[in-house]
Image (cartoon, grey):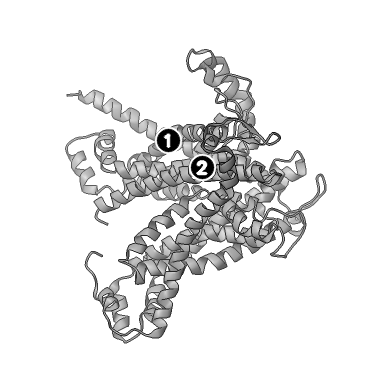
Amino acid sequence: MASMTRRKTVNAVMMTLSTGAAALGLFVLAVILLYLLYKGASALNLAVFTQDTPSPMEPGGLRNAILGSVIMSVIAVAIGTPIGILAGTYMAEYGRYAKLSKVIRFVNDILLSAPSIIVGLFVYQVLVVSLGHFSALAGSVALAILVIPIVVRTTEDMLRLVPDQLREAGLAMGWPRWIVIRTVAYKAAMAGIVTGVLLAIARISGETAPLLFTALSNNFFSLDLTQPMASLPITIFQFALSPYDNWQALAWAGALLITVAVLALSIVARLVTSKKEKH
Amino acid sequence: MTATSDYERGVNSARPVAQSDRIFGTLTLAAAVVVLLVLLGVFVSLVMGAWPALKEYGLPFLWTEKWNPVTEKFGALAPLYGTVVTSIIAMVIAVPVGLGIAIFLTETCPRMLRRPLGIAIELLAGIPSIIYGIWGLFVFAPFMQSYIQPFLIDTLGNVPVIGGLFAGPPYGIGMLTAGLILAMMILPFIASLARDIFQTVPPMLRESAYGMGMTRWEVNRHIVIPHVRTALVGGIMLSLGRALGETMAVTFVIGNAHRISGSILAPGTTISAAIANEFTEATTPIYTSSLIALGLVLFILTFIVLAAAQWMLKRMKQKSGA
């Protein structure tokens, strides 16, 4: 049997290593975030929100890119959320024991972690090639495809947590099932579903790859959904790789905006669920 | 959830249901089918888009290194190689560090800090990959070029056998840099996943092991990790799937060179980086089609990895009786 001292030494070494791993990991991530904050904050000013993307070495901002991101995200959520909630409802309510639910759960989990650039290729084939040009709408659809699996997953999980007795009570009142689902099940699962939607928004607000060849980009202010539209991630991508100082500064400002938005959304999502848990 | 509830039986019986209910039920079913159709559509559209390239080059597409838009000769080997190598580098670094963080969070970490640190790591897992990409380009690649790569070339570069891995001038960008950035990106993901998995171990198992006088490391090594092995492998494969398909964290720092080099310091490319960089510049139909064929290869690769991951994670759920 290994001696006590040896076992204790091994334990001390391994535990120090794991603490070291945690320290290293948190250090690296903190370095990235602090540098981002430093570069982003120094590039941030009012013009970033009020002016459009500039030519090289001209003053300008990110107004069209921010607006484009917001517009495409809103449409993506408007398309993806209803489909996601309904599909999740099918799996938790109508088809709880159906084979189809099992298949869809598997497919949904694959979609949840499939490379987002593949989604971009898919939408390119379906919407860009057939319509003949890049458009904000194609970008929105690509983002919607990323929204759906997140909402499906959280909706199903949350509905399954709703006790069946609640549903039975509703049915006993003589209500049809869809009324029971709407008034009882959805109400009980609401906080969780909202969390899912918020997390989905957080995810798509930083997605770059699926927009590269769907929405493309646009240097000008545009509200036309059938035309290419600027977005923050694509603008960051283009500006960061450019040799111009002012473009690079705007890329950092955009990166900071996205990170702040993503973190804020995730924190709000967390608060929504934790408030629910306290009741 | 095992017993069919009265609620469920009521549905399956022949009791007349309201017309409105049938409509809503069909609507939910239709939405569920949309999820299926999306995955099917992705696959079909990739095959259709890749068809001209597949017909032209056939299966040798997979092991042809040439990638020349001028002569219209395309092969997937270089990006495939880059995808695999950067993912391996990322996993070799991120898995042990991620597991270390998870063990730290479940064992060593003072109770007071557990929740905030856990939340911080979960939040970091959601940071978009373009952030890691831009940081990698402006901060990490120059740092690699000035300090790490010259050091590697001077020391490991002269060691026989592995020396070739660290040959060539320090470009800053390249496969190693991309792999490291990828590691940083998936690190919070692995750490929070592993922590969740460790927490499924019943407290009684831990307590009895501690009661027998096992040290913390022994409890983790002999009780916790074996108990969750399948799920852990599943979680690691899920992160591998992420690393394989990751685009933006890699595109910035890989160098986008379609060649295979024995040195991990050399610039290379990955499937997703090649698609991201070249797709809108692809001028000929066969060029575009070759890029979509690359996408198809990536899709099949990640599908296999993710499906295996799902299967392993599911086995744990069954075991824990959920």
Kindly identify the residue that appears in the image at 40 percent across and 34 percent down.
B96
Q: Quadrant of residue A20?
A: top left
Picture coordinates of residue A261, whole percent (x, y): 59, 56
Picture coordinates of residue A264, whole percent (x, y): 55, 57
Question: Counting other residues with Cα less than 10 Å from the Cα at mark 1, is it few (<14), some (14-19), or many (20 or more)?
Answer: many
Image quarter of the N terminus of chain B: bottom left
Q: Which mark is residue B3?
A: none
Q: Which mark is residue B297?
A: 2
Instruction: Say what amino acid the circle numbered 2 marks.
Output: Val
Image quarter of the C terminus of chain B: bottom left
Looking at this view, name the residue that lies furthest to the right. A58
- Closer-to-camera residue (B182/A35): B182
Discs 2/1, front: 2
Q: Is residue A116 visible?
A: no
Answer left or right for B253 relative to B70: left
Q: Is residue B71 visible?
A: yes
Instruction: Say what amino acid the circle numbered 1 marks.
Output: Val
Looking at this view, name the residue that lies furthest to the front. B55
Answer left or right for B281 relative to B307: right
Q: Quadrant of residue B235?
A: top left
- Lower position in the chain sequence, tag 2 or tag 1: 1
- Residue A131 vertical position relative to residue B46 in the rendered view, above or below: below
- Residue A44 vertical position relative to residue A173 in the rendered view, above or below: above
- Closer-to-camera residue (A23/B31): B31
**Chain containing the residue with disc 2:** B
Kindly identify the residue that appears in the image at 48 percent across and 31 percent down.
B89
Picture coordinates of residue B276, whole percent (x, y): 62, 44
Picture coordinates of residue B146, whole percent (x, y): 63, 24
**Chain containing the residue with disc 1:** B
Q: Which mark is residue B97?
A: 1
Q: Secondary structure at mark 1?
A: helix
Same subunit: marks 2 and 1: yes
